[in-house]
Image (cartoon, helix red, strand yellow):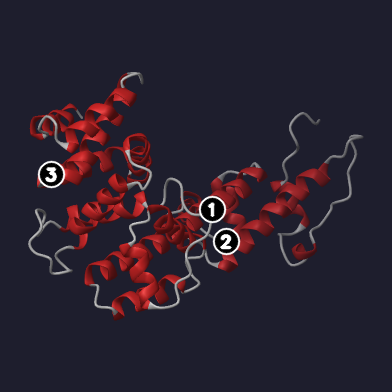
Amino acid sequence: MWEIISSFEARAAAGHDSRVSWDGGQARWVALEGRAALLHRAVLANSLALVHLASADDVGHLDALTRAEGAADIARIQERVLAPIDDPERSLTVRLIESLGRLAWGRRARTGTSVISGRPELEQTCAEAALRLLLVGKRAAEPRPVHAAADLDALIDGKDLAAWRALAAAAVAAPWTGQAERHLALISSGGRVGETAGLQAFVEMVQRVTREDERRAVAHQIRSSVESTGLSQREFAALIGTSPSRLSTYLTGAVAPSATMALRIARVARWVVATAVAGVDGAGGPAPRRRHPSDHDLGPGPRTRRRHARKRPGRA
């Protein structure tokens, strides 16, 4: 990270806008301790370099930061370090997003040779950085209505960061409604190749991230179901008719189970827990088993149920 800071300081001339922003911004993060202070200063230096200098080395530094911290966390830090030194219109942050967009999509927009031409992995880094920065920070309460290509052109050319972010947030909130695709059709009809590439990448990223979030949520639900039974993964896998290795892929989120399997996992987990509860009541005798209405067709025979039942902790 010191390399990022020293590289920027060596190129930022005294009195230049980039140096003024640097001098005013880095002092805010010296008070942080250790690595946190260094990380914030490095992200600030890299952000200003990408706005004012934008060399291949600067993109490489962004790539290194992203790999170390994650694109979402770097975007949050970019917003944190730029907001205090930006003007009310957030023109510095807008310029960073535009710079990242040119680096990511300039070649496809036929705007000339980029400093990272032929480096698709760095173009992808810039694309995700631009899109992630749109998803953090203050946004307008409601996205502007877009009914025609002229509305979208005005929104883009207005450089209103809060409006951009409101539109991005609306796409994230409902990624499957087709609204973003309608915007994409509008903007592509106007011949704005770079903006079309950027919006297409944004739509793809939002849908990818949504799928990943959904997969993680399913995996969390499955882990909770299995853990609630007190059974080992091998025992639970046997009850749902799959292998322990296959169940493991569901638990980690590596594979999303089918709707049928997800329903089976939930039902079997309820059945095992209900069996364990029914085995011992508060008076030490057998308690009636409370069955879920959807459990009528589930579960092995009575003897197997008793073998897999688990008593609640603390009960004799």
* Alpha-carbon span between mark 1 and mark 2: 23 Å
Residue of label 1: 217
Q: Nearer the viewer, mark 3 or mark 2?
A: 3
Left or right: residue 123 versus residue 210 is: left
- Looking at the rendered structure, the kind of residue marked 1 is Ala
Q: Position of residue 243 (x, y in %)?
A: 50, 56
Going from N to C along the chain, the mark reached first, 3 or 1, is 3
* Alpha-carbon span between mark 3 and mark 1: 41 Å
Left or right: residue 105 versus residue 228 is: left
Residue of label 3: 53
- Looking at the rendered structure, the kind of residue marked 3 is Leu
Residue of label 2: 241
Going from N to C along the chain, the mark reached first, 1 or 2, is 1
* Alpha-carbon span between mark 3 and mark 2: 60 Å
Q: Are marks 1 and 2 in contact (CB under 8 Å)?
A: no
Quadrant occupied by the C terminus: top right
